[in-house]
Amino acid sequence: MGPPISTSLILETLRELNERVSVPLWLFGGVAVDFLVGRWTRPHSDIDLNTYTESRAVLTDQLRGIGYRTCDTGWLTHWWQDGTERGIELVFLDRSPGGLTELRIPPDAPVGIPGRYPLWPGYLDPERFATLDGVSFRVGSPAGEWLGRAKAAVAGRTREPKVDHDLALLEALIPAHEIAQLRLCASQKSANSTNE
């Protein structure tokens, strides 16, 4: 994790992506939580985005067209924009045959625990936008964001204070009956992954 980036840099980056990229992108992670609650709640060291694997070629062309570069080819990619301080972390997700979205980490991936990780139903709704400081951007569902943080701790990652901070903020946005379902799902072994 790098040093905090300014909220103005985050907003400038998202504005440019809105204007110059046609491929649907969704915020996730800490910036998504702040967009969902409608205020800045803590510092951020990166801008995490999701999109579908099927959009990879078009998105790569569009990002290159506005000066972004990457050396990564896997499920998780880091992009930086030439001549600026702008950078994004981009995760590619698959649509499963059953209509759900899943994260697929292949056995040869340099990071992550290999497997297939189904995401919370409705996580990537193309019509779900949140607005912060005048910038609107697609966001994952509060339930999906909550589950991602809760399962990361179950999968063996160290639980940082920012995770508890985010979980508390998200719980205020999720109906109580859904929180109970999420807690049950989070407690299941290894994020319900199925190894390839």
Image (cartoon, rainbow, N blue to C red):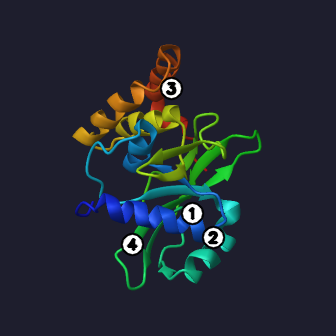
The earlier-in-sequence mark between 1 and 3 is 1
The earlier-in-sequence mark between 4 and 3 is 4
SS state under label 3: helix
| Vertical position of residue 79 compared to residue 26: above or below | below
Q: CA distance from mark 4 to mark 2?
A: 17 Å
Q: CA distance from mark 2 to mark 3?
A: 32 Å
SS state under label 4: loop
Q: CA distance from mark 1 to mark 3?
A: 33 Å
Residue placed under numbered mark 2 in the picture: 59
Q: Amino acid at mark 4?
A: Arg
How many numbered markers are drawn? 4
Q: Position of residue 156 (x, y in %)?
A: 34, 41
Disc 3 crowd, CA 10 A, few/some/many (<14, 14-19, 20+): some
The earlier-in-sequence mark between 4 and 2 is 2
Disc 1 crowd, CA 10 A, few/some/many (<14, 14-19, 20+): some
- The mark found on residue 18 in the picture is 1
